[in-house]
Amino acid sequence: MLNKELLNALNEQMNHEYFAAHAYMAMAAFCDKESYEGFANFYVQQAKEERFHGKKIYDYINDRGEHALFATIPAPKSDFSSILETFQDGLAQEQDVTRRFYNLSDLANQAKDYATISFLNWFLDEQVEEEAMFETHLDYLKRIGDDSNTLYLYEKELAARSFDEE
């Protein structure tokens, strides 16, 4: 059984993961509108990954004999000035998620809930990868700048991205 504060925080994080999926779909929609299909695919795959994370928390809550509760998900930002801005927002979102998992880990440690501590370690490791990925994409996009040919090639690379559940 999870203590109430930790259960509430896990439910909140589960919902935030689904919000993140919505935010990435909004970024995909912007990219599609601007005819950047490769970048749109990148964000669609990212949304799939966030839904996977949400489901992972959902399963954990239920495996612990508790009730996963869904809340209203606010509409995400849907207008961007550039592809670069979508990646800047994506990095900021991932940094926020990392902070949230640190807070969850603090709660689990305070509660001496070792099963939850173990469960959360997977997400902490995942967040290192997520932030590094967005930082790398931002570095590439800044280097590419206004070079439309290189941007085209980079977009084609991202069009091949797929998410496979781990």
Image: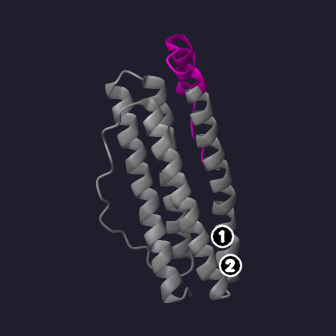
Q: Is residue 97 positioned above or below 37 on the image?
A: below
Image x and y of residue 94, in percent: 54, 53
User: Which secondary structure, mark 2?
Assistant: helix
Instruction: Check residue 48 for magenta coloring.
Output: no
Image x and y of residue 12, in percent: 44, 71
Position of 28 with respect to 3 (left or right) is left
Viewer-closest of 164 and 7: 7
Residue 8 at least partly seen: yes
Q: Which residue is mark 1?
A: 119
Tell whether label 2 touches label 1 (CB within 8 Å): yes
Q: Where is the N terminus found, in terms of image quarters?
A: bottom right
Position of 46 with respect to 120 (left or right) is left
Helix, strand or loop: magenta stretch: helix
Viewer-closest of 1 and 4: 4
Instruction: Check residue 164 for magenta coloring.
Output: yes
**Which amino acid lies under the numbered mark 2 shown in the image of this protein?**
Ala
For image coordinates 49% across by 13% down, the residue present is 148
**Which amino acid lies under the numbered mark 1 shown in the image of this protein?**
Phe
For image coordinates 66% across by 45% down, the residue present is 132
Q: Which residue is mark 2?
A: 115
For image coordinates 68% across by 78% down, the residue present is 115
Label 1, residues with CA under 10 Å away: few <14, some 14-19, many ≥20: some
**Magenta-highlighted residues:** 143-165
Residue 44 at least partly seen: no
Viewer-closest of 154 and 146: 146
